[in-house]
Amino acid sequence: MQKDLAYYLSLDYPIECYAGEYEVGDAYLAQFTDFDIKASSEDYDEAIEIAQEYLKSHIKLELELGHELPNPGEGVRFMEHREALKAYRNRDFEKAMSLWEEEVKHKNDQAMTNIGLMYLKGEGVEKDFIKAREWFEKASEYGNDSANYNLALMYQTKLGVEEDQDAAVNYFRRAVEKNHQGANFRLGLTLLKDRTDNERVKEGFECMLNAAKSGHPMALAQMGGVDKEPNISCEPNNMFRSYSKEKQLEVIEDAIDRYIRPILIKDGGDITLLDYINEPEIEIRLAYQGNCAGCSMASTSTYGIIMDTLSQVIDKNIRLYVI
């Protein structure tokens, strides 16, 4: 893809907006954290809009001058960050460490995380889990997703710390807020182990679905239906679609009770309806229980049976996810 103005404007550059006292008095300050670009206004949305116009003008000028531009999240000192990464990939760990230590002085949380990873792996330094954790904790204060993910793994696997599953879940959740793929998968896996708490199962389902949609191979093996698209050209079941959401739910639950659940119960399993969405499209989320729970084959081997059943009750223009 050509890296022109349209390309860079399509990127999701992080923006922060704060309320406070600025040059226009009590107002909002919007700032793109990868650039030295700020805009203020008494209106929150207007501050962001002005900052976006400033960003557009800045990128246009930089491209005309032939200057390099950061990727989202690289920060204002992105060239220094890239130099450190190049040194690291060339296994010049001493140079990488020196550059990242300088970046830490500028509150670069990714540099903090990278130093933590070097201590975790023993790259260029003696392996030290305590120092790794300390660097991850510093980066975590800035909301770094990779730092939070690694802290979660350390608490989950007793790596240099006492096992603390609650702490692991907490750090995974922080990383999931930034849509970290691995954290989505790991948190989903953790919350779906015990399927007796419906709220935890719903949260775990959402995480696993996010991981699967992002292409995580193990999440794709767990979640059935991610690779299926609704048949929008099928004959619609106008009667079902004219029902209220409550009535539609009754019909779906009846079909599950009569045609799907008995098959699973024979094998010591069960299934529960986690969520039903009927706007803008019909989406059904189901979770296996009992012997079927957590089995990667369950999400695929019985998926066809469930889909066929619900397609007959509704129509084929539905989205079905099963885990």
Image (cartoon, helix red, strand yellow):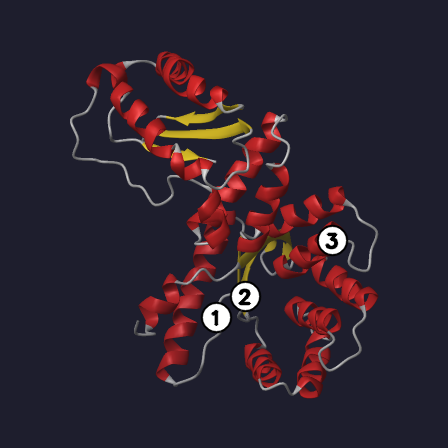
Q: Which residue is mark 3?
A: 157
Circle 2 crowding by C-alpha within 10 Å: few under 14, some 14–19, many from 20: some
Circles 2 and 1: CB distance less than 8 Å? yes
Q: Nearer the viewer, residue 177 or 38?
A: 177
Q: Indicate the amino acid at tag 3.
A: Thr
Q: In terms of image quadrants, where is residue 277?
A: top left
Q: Nearer the viewer, residue 268 or 239?
A: 268
Q: Indicate the amino acid at tag 2.
A: Gly
Q: Nearer the viewer, mark 2 or mark 3?
A: 3
Residue 130 locus on image (x, y percent): 83, 65
Numbered tag placed on residue 145 in the rendering: none
Numbered tag placed on residue 73 in the rendering: 2
Q: In terms of image quadrants, where is residue 108?
A: bottom right
Q: Nearer the viewer, residue 101 or 215?
A: 215
Q: Indicate the amino acid at tag 1.
A: Asn
Numbered tag placed on residue 71 in the rendering: 1
Label 1 element class: loop
Residue 150 locus on image (x, y percent): 68, 59
Circles 2 and 3: CB distance less than 8 Å? no
Q: Earlier in the sequence, mark 2 or mark 3?
A: 2
**What is the CA distance from the residue labelled 2 to the residue labelled 1?**
6 Å
Residue at 62%, 38% in the rendered image? 191
Q: Nearer the viewer, residue 122 or 317?
A: 122
Circle 3 crowding by C-alpha within 10 Å: few under 14, some 14–19, many from 20: some
Query: Is residue 84 in view from this perspective?
Result: yes
